[in-house]
Image (cartoon, rainbow, N blue to C red):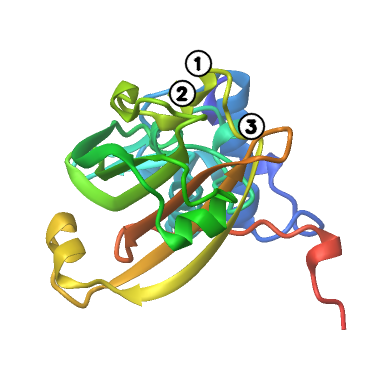
Amino acid sequence: MTLREFIKPCHFTHRGEGPKYLQLRNLIRKAILSGALEHSDALPAERDLAGFSGLSRVTVRNAIKLLVREGTLVQRRGSGSFVSASPSDMQQSTTLLASFSTEMARRGLTARSIWIKRGRFYPSPDEIFALGLSQRSMVSRLMRVRYADDRPMAVERATLPVAILPDPNVVNESLYATLENMGNAPVRASQKISAINLKKADAELLKIPEGSAGLKIERVAYLANGIASEFTRSLYRGDAYEFVADLTPNEIDKR
């Protein structure tokens, strides 16, 4: 089937399946899942989608915005909307343990880093507490600016016990890929997200004005045996990044 066959007017119901823009979004996702649209394929123009589906261009535009927001599509100025990856991998959630490199790949973007500092050090009090270390322990620290294509997105400061990462210089682009190859990939993590105003040094690294809004993410990751394996503090630019929490019925306040 082609995309046009997926979004025929007869496939839209008047009730029971939500607003029409949500129905269109779901049908486009089904088309991608079926292979009718593949990675990097261009989506037809809004006016064509409206013609195929019998929906208004406003409805089509809202569906596309939602698909872009969740990562199913990426928009390129002057070129249109393109499929970024398989829809089963599109939802970005605060409950998903994934590396920055993986998150960017889902959006059809290339992750790269500029290293600021890395080496072996004695742990700070915060690192001792977060990782459950003794004062005599050594840690590997990695500080870098994370880029999506050519845009700086985050300043990342990661600390790992040397028992987990003996040599920080072996990390190329993905820390988690390196840990997986070493048999030390984390299986779960807890993280705290807070809003901040970026200080001068971090703002300069992200190429935005001092005092700009940002997101501070503190994550502690754990191995399957429960040992804390990673303490990462990241600062994301607030004008280009957002985190989405997916709630299940048990997590929704029903009072």
Find the distance from the CA under tag 1 to the CA under tag 3: 34 Å
Q: What is the x, y in percent for residue 254? A: 86, 77
Residue 134 vs 101, above or below: the answer is below
Residue 217 location in percent, x, y?
Answer: 45, 60
Q: How many marks?
A: 3
Which secondary structure, mark 1?
helix
Camera-near label (1 vs 3) is 1
Identify the residue position indicated by label 1 in the image.
181
Is the residue 58 above or below the residue 109 in the image?
A: below
Q: Amino acid at mark 2?
A: Ala
Q: Position of residue 189 (x, y in %)?
A: 62, 47
The reply to whether residue 56 is visible in this rendering is no
Please rate how many residues cluster around mark 2, counting C-alpha atoms within 10 Å: few if below 14, some from 14 to 19, many from 20. some
Does the residue at mark 2 contact the one at mark 3 (Cβ under 8 Å)?
A: no
Q: From the viewer's side, name the closer residue of 62 and 190.
A: 190
* CA separation in Å, label 2 and label 1: 6 Å
Image point 42% across, 45% down: which residue? Answer: 159
Compared across the picture, whether 97 is left or right of 139 comes to right
Q: Are marks 2 and 1 in contact (CB under 8 Å)?
A: yes
**Residue highlighted by disc 2:** 177
- The answer to which of marks 1 and 3 sits earlier in the sequence is 3
Say what secondary structure mark 3 lies in.
helix
Mark number displayed over residue 30:
3
Q: Residue at 32% across / 28% down in the picture? A: 173
* Residue 148 in which image quadrant: top left
Which quadrant of the structure image shows residue 87? top right
Please say if 32 is above or below 115: above
